[in-house]
Amino acid sequence: MVNRRISPDIKECALCLWELGWDRSAICSTLLVSQASPYRWVQIFEEFGSVTPPPFMGRPRIIGLSALTAIKEIYTLHADTYLLELQWRLAIHHDIQISTLALQETLECTGLTRKLLHKIAIEREHERCCDFLYTIQHGFSGTGHEFVTVDESSKNEHDVACRYGRAPIGMLADFEDVFIRGIRYTLVAAMGMDGYIAQPVVEGSLDSYDFFDFIVEDVVPEMGVFPDNCSVLVMDNCRIHHTDMLQETLNAQGIMLLYLPPMIYSQVADYLGVADYPVANSMRQRGQSNHNSIVQS
C-alpha cells in the first residue's frame, strides 16, 4: 500500500463507520487500508476539520508584532531601506532569519508596498517653506489671480525620444533614433490663472540678458500694479533670474517680485492653481511634430 492514493470519500466513510461502532479491523479489511490509517485520518480531521490536510507551503516565516513595529518605524524614517538591510536588522536585533522573498511577501501583507520614491531635497528648509506658504495664503486675496509664474525649459533631438518600450523576454527593446543632439531650443513662458501670457522660443540657451528682455518686453506690459490682478511675478531661484536691473524695473512698474524658497515649487504651484508642466515631457508625449509647430510659430 506504499504511495497509494486514497480518496477523501473512503477516508470519510471509514471515520463514519468507526464512529458508528464498527470494528477497526473490519473497516480496514473492507476498505483495503492499513490498520494505522484510521488513526492518522482522525488526527488530521481533529487538526484541520477535514480528512485531507492543506497543501504543504513550506516552513512558515513568522514576524512578531514587535519586529513589525520596528520595521514600520524604519520605513517611516528611511523609506529607501533595502530588503537586504532590513533582513540584516531582523537577524541582528530580533534574531529572525528570513529570506528576502518571504520578507517581501510579509511586507505586502502588512501594507508596506513597494512604491516609487518621492524625493525630498535635503537642502530644503522646512520652517522657511512654511513661512512662505503662510504669507501666500494670508497676505493676498486668496484667489490666485495676482500671481504670474515664470519658468523655462529646453530640449534637443534626444529629449523627444521615448524612454521606455516593450520586447519579448530575453530580447532587447531596440528602436532607431538620432545620435546627434542637434539644435537646442529653450521655451520660456509666463502663466497666470487665465492661461499663458507669453511663451517665446529661443534657439540655444537662455542667459540673463535674454530673460530680462523677455520680462520687460513681453510680460510687464500684460501685468498690473500691486495688488491688482497679474501684479505679482513668481519665479524660482535660477541664477539668470537674480539681477538688480530686473528688480529695479519691476519696482518702478509697481510689480512685486517673489522668489520661491528652495525646494517648494510644486507646493506653491498647487496652491496658486497653476501647474508649471515641463515642456520637454510634453514634447516627448506629443512627438517631434508638435515641437516643430511650436518653433515655427
Image (tube, rainbow, N blue to C red):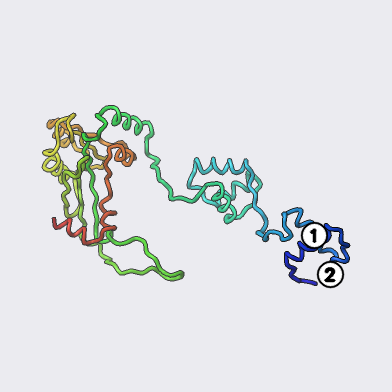
**In the depicted structure, whether residue 67 falls above or below residue 125:** below
Judging by the rendered image, the residue that carries numbered circle 2 is 30
Classify mark 1: residues with Cα within 10 Å, few (<14), some (14-19) or many (20+): few
Is the residue 84 above or below the residue 76 in the image?
below
Residue at disc 2, secondary structure:
helix
Q: Residue at x 75, y 53 (%)?
A: 47
Per the image, label 1 sits on a secondary structure element best described as helix
In this view of the protein, which residue sits in the foreground, 208 or 267?
267
What is the number of the mark on residue 268? none
Residue corresponding to mark 1: 16
Q: Nearer the viewer, residue 29 or 53?
A: 29
The image quadrant that residue 238 belongs to is top left
> Whole-percent x and y of residue 235?
24, 39
Residue 58 x %, y %: 66, 59
Which sits earlier in the primary sequence, circle 2 or circle 1? 1
Which residue is pictured at 12% across the width and 32% down the height?
253
Mark 2 to mark 1: distance in Å?
Answer: 14 Å
Q: Nearer the viewer, residue 95 or 59?
A: 59
Number of callouts: 2
Taking the spot 55% from the left edge, 53% from the top edge, the residue there is: 104
Would you identify the image quadrant in which residue 289 lies? bottom left
**Vertical relation: 69 (above or below) 166:** above
Q: Amino acid at mark 1?
A: Cys
The three-letter amino acid code for the residue at tag 2 is: Thr
| Residue at x-position 36% and y-position 31% | 130
